[in-house]
Image (cartoon, helix red, strand yellow):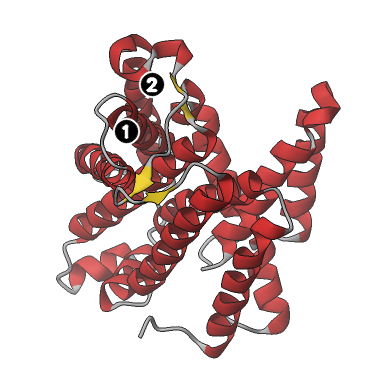
Amino acid sequence: MFGFTRAQAVGFLLMAALLAVAPFVVYPIFVMQVMCFALFAMGANLLMGYTGLLSLGQAAFFGMGGYVAGYMIQTMHASTEVGLLLGGLTAAAIGVVFGWLAIRRQTIYFAMITLALAQLVYFFAVQDTGFTGGENGIQNIPRGALFGSIPLHADKQIYWLVFAVFILGFLFVHRVIHSPFGQVVKAIRENENRAISLGYKVEHYKWIIFVLAAALGGVAGGLNALVVRIATLTDVGNVTSGLVVLMVLVGGIGTVFGPLVGAAIIVAMQYYLASFSDWVTVIQGTIFIACVLAFRRGVAGEVASWLKLSL
């Protein structure tokens, strides 16, 4: 149904099983953040790995998704699912505008335009203290109850919501990649001029992928805001845009499981290297260099190559 190969089906079932067991073995907040950032990275991977577009402004969608979800749930007393939905829709709406402005450019010009547009969103987040809270952010975001009846206050309660959204997001992205639409997108990445000569409206395909990536980023940002109960300027800043690019590159650009692997590595470093204080940046840089030298196609890409599988 979703176009899985046997190897991908086995990998998906193994991934789902590990994530289902994880909250009983590992700190639930850590695993939830891995899933949130993996969902975020899946959107970035659609752009980078399957369309060939490097966006340096994905944090705009992640951050605004968190702000909208947090504001709607905390201030407007919306239900959890409505807050998440509005966060994703808001990010998608921003993606429609940003995509229309950016997709007419390629390579470094596209990257610079997305970076500049993301800075506009960051400036808005700093200045509009009534909505975003400015430098204080939106704090103590309530998790509420799903559909008004399923409580999400405890970590292990909201874990299953994050798990369900991640699995649905993973299946959606996999289906997009392996659909006729996805095949055209790959053809555009491989030879854009050839795709144009065949009559495909290349800019429309890029635009749709850009909006899909924005929507995934918005949902991921909303989920992350609920998990950590706060939406801050960090979520909408350049550092977050850089992190998601690293997640895609380290995990394996253009692979289905790469975003999850990359997110797990990056988030784990943030959690478990914090005690090294000033040495964190040095250690992270060393690990990144090692990954680039040893895993040029990313961790998932190299494993797939060794096993001669399509992951």
Tag 1 or tag 2, which sits nearer the N-term? 1
Q: Which mark is residue 73?
A: 1
Q: In this view, does 23 lie to the left or right of 281?
A: left
Cα separation, mark 2 vs mark 1, equals: 22 Å
Residue 310 can be seen, yes or no: yes
Residue 304 percent location from the top left of the image = 65, 76
Residue 16 percent location from the top left of the image = 57, 71
Task: Examine the rendered structure and indicate whether residue 257 appears above or below residue 28.
Answer: below
Mark 1: few, some, or many residues within 10 Å (few <14, many ≥20)?
many
Tag 1 secondary structure: helix
Residue 102 can be seen, yes or no: no
Location of the N terminus by quadrant is: bottom left
Location of the C terminus by quadrant is: bottom right
Identify the residue at horizontal 26%, vertical 72% (top origin): 181
In this view, the residue in front, 242 or 40, is: 40
Q: Which amino acid does label 2 sit on?
A: Tyr
Tag 2 secondary structure: helix
Identify the residue at horizontal 23%, vertical 52% (top origin): 207
Q: What residue type is labelled 1?
A: Ile
Disc 2: which residue: 122
In this view, the residue in front, 65 or 278, is: 65
Residue 195 percent location from the top left of the image = 25, 69
